[in-house]
Image: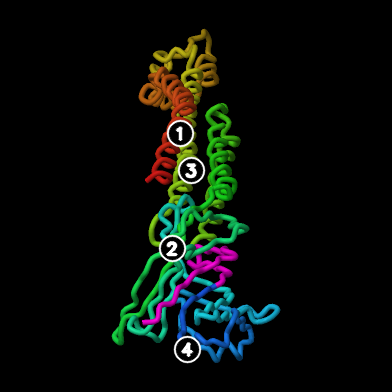
């Protein structure tokens, strides 16, 4: 079989999209092979052909990119193709292409992930009995020194051979694997730092008065809605996958911390309001002789207007009402110390949350970053 050496020069590498699972490159494809028919004495020095008409007259290997979605041949300002014939019959064929390749990404750790994107080159019509593709032993894949990507860095380029089998034969195939590491700068500024600050702001309610219902409620609801809006915006930028991503775990935990702070305020506010009711009822009965009220014993006075005075001081309806209040007090509010204990419990809960919430959030961060960065 005819051996064709291949090498790639990557001019630009970018537009990596998680939603469409692809990336774009601007590359130079160089192919080397030897054609004995062009080993002619008349060729004394290397002959360069860049006219597409002349290039078509020379035999060239029929290669293609199996995982390419789109391809475009460069014509600016002239057709970017070169065929060089050396005196010994060796041929160099080079052309410039703008390609879009598919890259099947695993987004379990997004945006703390590393991806491997491949670029495949294969023979289209010639089987391995006729054409054999091999990588250039020197530098099979060369990256431009000016190559920059906004969100990724190329950690390693690995080259290997692959075979494409079909019913009509085996075809030679080459694959280049680009190991990409995502940069955290963008997501740290746009996602992680803002949500951390929002969670910390929700803890301010622990230092506010228990009876500051409008302030604490507004703070809790506002932070909860802000995190929910941020989470919705991040989900719109990423593909809809069936598994949980690292950013989903983070946003879910932040939402849970803020929601827990709101529930904590609801509990202590209930305890505080219960204390106020107990205190008000117990204070209202201070100075009353409850035994005389229950017996309907009223102050006696001399004279014929005794019944009238009694009626004016304690009307029957008032006496009945007092009896009901007394009964309710003896049943429900007979232990005012219970209310004071509830108030103290509510204050203690607030003071404990000032430590427990930051501590738990710190523990969550340790586990989160350790797991997704090192495992």
| Residue 331 percent location from the top left of the image | 36, 24
Q: Which residue is mark 4?
A: 37
The residue positioned farthest toward the left in the image shown: 167
Q: Which is more N-terminal, label 1 or label 2?
A: 2
**Which of the numbered marks, if any, corresponds to residue 254?**
3
> How many angstroms separate mark 2 from mark 3 (CA)?
36 Å
**Residue closest to the eye, 229 or 250:** 250
Nearer to the camera, 313 or 287: 287
Q: Residues within 10 Å of mark 4 (few under 14, many from 20)?
A: few
- Residues drawn in magenta: 1-28
Q: Is residue 135 above or below residue 42?
A: above
Mark 4 or mark 2, earlier in chain: 4
Q: Secondary structure at mark 3?
A: helix
Q: Residue at x 50, y 22 (%)?
A: 280
Q: Nearer the viewer, residue 60 or 84?
A: 84
Any part of residue 225 in sight: no
Mark toward the viewer: 4 or 2 = 4
Q: Are marks 2 and 1 in contact (CB under 8 Å)?
A: no
For the point 41% across and 68% down, which residue is it?
175
Q: Mark 1 = which residue?
A: 362
Residue at 48% x, 17% y is 285
């Amino acid at each position: 079989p005819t051996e064709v050496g291949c090498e790639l020069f990557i001019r630009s590498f970018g537009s990596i999209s998680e939603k469409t699972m692809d990336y774009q490159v601007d590359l130079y494809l160089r192919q080397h092979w030897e054609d004995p028919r062009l080993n002619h004495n008349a060729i004394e020095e290397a002959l360069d052909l860049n006219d597409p008409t002349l290039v078509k007259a020379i035999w060239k290997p029929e290669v293609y990119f199996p995982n390419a979605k789109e391809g475009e041949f460069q014509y600016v300002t002239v057709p970017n193709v070169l065929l060089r014939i050396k005196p010994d019959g060796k041929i160099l064929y080079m052309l410039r292409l703008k390609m879009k390749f598919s890259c099947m990404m695993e987004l379990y750790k997004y945006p703390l992930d590393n991806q491997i994107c491949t670029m495949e080159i294969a023979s289209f019509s010639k089987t391995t009995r006729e054409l054999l593709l091999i990588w250039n032993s020197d530098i099979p894949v060369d990256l431009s020194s000016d190559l920059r990507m906004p969100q990724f860095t190329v950690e390693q380029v690995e080259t290997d051979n692959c075979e494409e089998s079909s019913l009509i034969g085996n075809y030679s195939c080459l694959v280049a694997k680009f190991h990409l590491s995502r940069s955290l700068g963008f997501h740290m500024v746009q996602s992680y730092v803002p949500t951390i600050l929002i969670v910390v702001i929700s803890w301010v309610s622990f230092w506010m008065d228990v009876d500051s219902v409008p302030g604490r409620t507004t703070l809790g609801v506002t932070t909860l809605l802000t995190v929910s809006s941020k989470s919705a915006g991040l989900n719109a930028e990423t593909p809809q996958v069936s598994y949980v991503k690292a950013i989903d775990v983070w946003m879910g935990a932040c939402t849970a911390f803020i929601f827990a702070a709101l529930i904590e305020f609801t509990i202590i506010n209930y305890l505080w309001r219960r204390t106020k009711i107990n205190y008000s009822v117990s204070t209202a009965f201070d100075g009353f002789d409850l035994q005389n009220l229950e017996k309907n014993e009223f102050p006696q006075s001399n004279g014929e207007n005794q019944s009238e005075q009694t009626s004016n001081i304690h009307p029957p309806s008032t006496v009945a009402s007092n009896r009901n209040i007394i009964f309710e007090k003896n049943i429900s509010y007979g232990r005012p110390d219970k209310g004071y204990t509830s108030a103290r419990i509510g204050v203690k809960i607030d003071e404990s949350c000032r430590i427990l919430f930051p501590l738990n959030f710190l523990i969550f961060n340790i586990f989160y970053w350790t797991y997704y960065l090192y495992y």
